[in-house]
Image (cartoon, grey):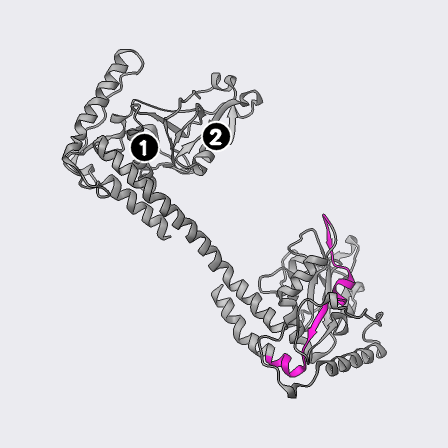
Amino acid sequence: MIAEQLKKAVLQAAIQGKLTNQRPEDGDARDLLKEIKAEKARLVKEGKLKKEKPLPEITEDEIPFEIPENWVWVRLGNIILTGRSGGTPDTKNTQYYGGQIPFVTIKDMTTAGMYIDKTFSSITDLGVQNSSAWIIDPNHILYSMYASIGKVSINKIPLASSQAIFAMQLIDNEIFRNFVYTYLLSMESKVYKQAAGTTQLNINAKIVKEMLLPLPPLAEQQRIVERLEEVLPEIDQLAHDETKLDELEKAFPKKMKDAILQYAIQGKLTEQLPEDGDARDLLKEIQQEKAKLVKAGKIKKTPPLPPITEDEIPFDIPENWVWCGLGEMVSLISGTSYNKGDIASDGIRILRGGNVIDKKHEIKFHTDDVFVSKKYLDNEKQVKENDVVIVGSTGSSTVIGKPAFVNIAPSDSQIGAFLRIIRPLYDDCIAYIHTIFKSSYYREHISNSVQGTNIFNIRADIILEMPIPLPPLAEQKRIVDRLEELLPLCEKLE
């Protein structure tokens, strides 16, 4: 992302002396380095600090870039007074945890910003006494050495840390502390090159202390820190905006697809033509066809649907369209219940929720599909071409009502008890009915209608009494043709 690259570039410019102007009156950073060495020597003499082995001299080959003349290259260990990692009390001992001492872990380091003033967990005095953990006074620089290597923060409160955190004490100067923080922040991506390990990348205290740091005079450090305080919040805002834009871009294809489908079923995607006729005549034909199927014994007779009231109509439709219950156009078929003892290695495949939940809304077969003996054969419950199979009962509020469209009927497959078949009664309306089930209007209807807390169920009336905007056949064809042009474009965007 641009913001991340920009932040790296700005931090790199800062530690190279390219973000601010150098001034002769700033003096020389070598004098600051002498002050730090003198302070360390004093603390060693007073017994407050152990004398350490000298760090390796900096060679020309190690220096990664040029710096201004009044700056100086140092090793990080040369400018810190003390530096040590923490320790983790035995996690099995409950007496060591939940006390009054904040306890910093990698989790805190990955979520904190510049300052840490609270932690996710805490330990007790007993936990400190029985581990290598120690109380870190405020204003130490905390540096992560395991897992999320190179995360850096400054503690504003007394706390302890795990062994994955290296705590550094500097001379008591906020400008100096903030500059070192800035330097370590700029090194986050580079420090991985020095990481070692197999199962978990890590660095150690020796690597941290031997890291190179370009040290400017204090006055220059202050200007760098002040400049970054102006620039970095703007970059952070850019990162926030980029994240939101990325989310919008990811959501756009689906939102566009939903909008197109909604326009389609509202009559806003195509032109209405007088020669199309009136959908009320089509509805009469569908009702006649349904009566024929009932008389022929091909479908069961169902009670008349209640009339659709004004309050039920969710949006306006063209004058030559008509609102009708979905049950006027489809039959609803429940699934097969079977005994576990009748499960077989072959026979009739029983489709379950997992066979329907597919991004492409297709029926999918799986290696763990259930088969039952042929005695469960039920022609009505067998999945047929052009059926819509939906999840009718499930423990998931996001899965309930999910549709799959059957383009090619699978052989010897019928739905299980948790599925429902929506079978169109009038062939010419099949494609338009499928459009309804692809729409957000259908999803919202299910979401607003299903019952249950732990288990969600779709009652028959929720499907059969769902108000459907029905266009004349000619308009249905134009709608379907237009969707076949537009929806693939949305899928390409995805």
Residue at label 1?
178
Question: Which residue is nearer to you in this view: 491 or 203?
Answer: 491
What amino acid type is highlighted by mark number 1? Asn
Does residue 284 sit above or below 33 in this rendering?
below
Label 2 Cα crowd, 10 Å radius (few <14 / some 14-19 / many 20+):
some
Does residue 492 sit above or below 54 in this rendering?
below
Task: Indicate left or right for 160 with 294 as reference.
Answer: left
Residue 335 found in image quarter: bottom right
Question: Which residue is nearer to you in this view: 480 or 399?
Answer: 480
Instruction: Tell me where the magenta segment starts and ends, as one range.
Output: 453-478
Residue 469 found in image quarter: bottom right
Residue at label 2?
118
Task: Indicate left or right for 262 with 190 as reference.
Answer: right
- The residue positioned 81% from the left and 64% from the top of the image is 375
Q: Position of residue 346 (x, y in %)?
A: 71, 61
- The residue positioned 30% from the left and 16% from the top of the image is 49
